Image: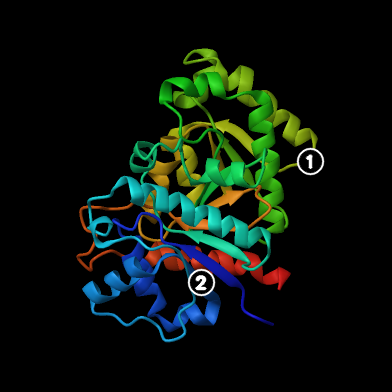
Amino acid sequence: MRLPVLGITLGDVCGIGPEITIKVLNRSEVYRTCKPIVIGDYGALKKAACVLNLKMPKDLSIVSVTHLDKSNLIYGRPTKEVGEAAIAYIKRAVELAKKREIDGIVTCPVNKEVINKAGIPFSGHTELLAKLTNTKRYAMLLSGDRINVVLVTIHVPLRDVPKLISTEKILDTIELTHQFFIEKMGISHPKLAVAGLNPHAGEGGLIGREDREIITPAIEEAKRRGLDVEGPLPPDTIFYFAKEGRYDVVICMYHDQCLIPFKLLHFRDGVNITMGLPIIRTSVDHGTAYDIAGKGIADPSSLIAAIKVAAKMARPAC
């Protein structure tokens, strides 16, 4: 059985993306998992190797989408060109995945502010990938060996969350999660839990009505369709029980509701997975870390985990 071919996008080349990528490419365990192809900028990767005193692998496969000059390769000082380049890497990776020249995509971090300042409307990898693949039904999954969490809403202001959740959207997320865990995560009967929006899941309507009027009907309908799902459960206890193994995944209403407990447990090794795409995409679960870029201290653990998850997801199709 051949190893899956995975495209690793460098992300923001002024952040830690090139550094963690070259560290990963110098680890033999990666080549036992997949055949990596770097999608980005050869000069950026070579600079990271020089700074870290690491070798450029002899058989390195790289699709050099850009050829940025030195003024754009200063750690911690991203330019407009760097923002444009980050998007170009993602687009090329999607093209290769659509053509089945690669079996999956693993993305290094980008900076939303830098990309938007470059004149490109951008709210996140997930939304862009959905647009590039014409995907209407998708969700963000954060995966670790202790808990898994899924978001109903992603990168939106907190004040907008109550207006953006609906019974239909929550039910759709529940069903998508159930299907994904069976087909891609290898769990035949996934146990799902749904977090409430308000403290104590609304306390029967005393602390907000969304839990009773919007979230509960979605869960009841999912149960009628045969899914193993509980909720809405109080957000302040649901993650403890998930960590203890009661649930395979927790479905959350908004970004920080699930990212705070998830990163508490999986800050180093968490993996971001986009469910619903026609292609495989995983990512590191951290940012560009401009403050430590080029210092040699960036931890590649999340990238290694993302590669292993993508390879596992791709392997059955090989």
Residue receiving disc 2: 37
CA gap between label 2 and label 1 equals: 41 Å
User: Residue 9, percent across and down?
Assistant: 46, 61
- Above or below residue 168? Residue 283 is below
The residue sitting at 50% across, 81% down in the picture is 31
Residue 280: x and y in percent read 61, 58
The residue carrying mark 1 is 226
Q: Is residue 103 left or right of residue 196?
A: right
Q: Secondary structure at mark 1?
A: loop
Q: Quadrant of the N terminus?
A: bottom right
Amino acid type at circle 1 is Gly
Dot 2: what SS?
strand
Q: Quadrant of the C terminus?
A: bottom right
Here the colouring is rainbow
Observer-side mark, 2 or 1, equals: 2
Q: Earlier in the sequence, mark 2 or mark 1?
A: 2
Q: Residue at x 61, y 62 (%)?
A: 96
Kindly give the residue lying farthest to the right in the view shown.
Answer: 225
Q: State how many labels appear.
A: 2
- The location of residue 204, given as percent across then percent down, is 55, 17
